[in-house]
Structures are given as C-alpha cells and as structure tokens.
Image (spheres, grey):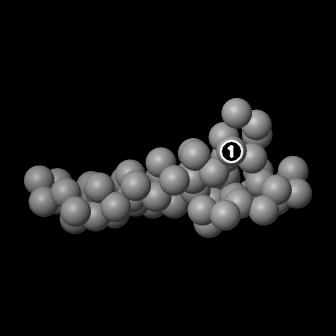
C-alpha cells in the first residue's frame, strides 16, 4: 500500500467513525461533541499531510 492509499484509508476510517458517533444514542451530547471535535481534528491532520505531500485525496 502506498502513502496515498494509506492516507485515503485513514480518511475513510475517520469519516466512518464520525458517522458512528453521530448515530450513537447511548452517549450524551457533550461527549458526542467532544468525540466529533477530536475526529474532525484528526481528519484535518490527514488532509493537511496529504497537501504537504502534494497528494490529492479522493475521499476528502
């Protein structure tokens, strides 16, 4: 797996994790917001790394 595929895979995993947090009915809104914030920060870091390496990420 090359670096581009790895970043795209990570981006897909983060996107799915965000969706799971949004749909989780067993957590409070405060916890949900905190988890989404952390996942969005991670997603932004992946996109930034792709830009740094001049990789166009399709999953973004």
- Residue located beneath label 1 in the image: 5
Q: Answer whether residue 29 is visible to the viewer in this image.
A: yes
Q: Answer whether residue 34 is visible to the viewer in this image.
A: no
Q: Position of residue 22 (x, y in %)?
A: 28, 64
Q: Position of residue 38 (x, y in %)?
A: 47, 53
Local packing at callout 1 (Cα closer than 10 Å; few below 14, some 14-19, many 20+) is few
Residue found 51% across the figure and 53% down from its top: 12
Residue extending furthest toward the left: 26
Residue found 88% across the figure and 57% down from its top: 54
Q: Position of residue 29 (x, y in %)?
A: 22, 65
Residue extending furthest toward the top: 1
Left of 50 or right of it: where is 46?
left
Residue extending furthest toward the front: 1
Left of 58 or right of it: where is 35?
left
Q: Position of residue 36 (x, y in %)?
A: 40, 59
Work out which quarter of the rendered image holds the C terminus and state it.
bottom right
Q: Is residue 49 above or below residue 23?
A: above
Question: In what element is the residue under mark 1?
Answer: helix
């Amino acid at each position: 797996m090359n670096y581009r595929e790895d970043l795209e895979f990570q981006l897909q995993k983060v996107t799915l994790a965000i969706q799971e947090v949004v749909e989780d009915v067993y957590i409070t809104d405060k916890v949900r917001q905190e988890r989404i914030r952390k996942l969005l920060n991670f997603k932004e870091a992946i996109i930034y790394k792709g830009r740094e390496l001049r990789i166009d990420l399709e999953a973004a």
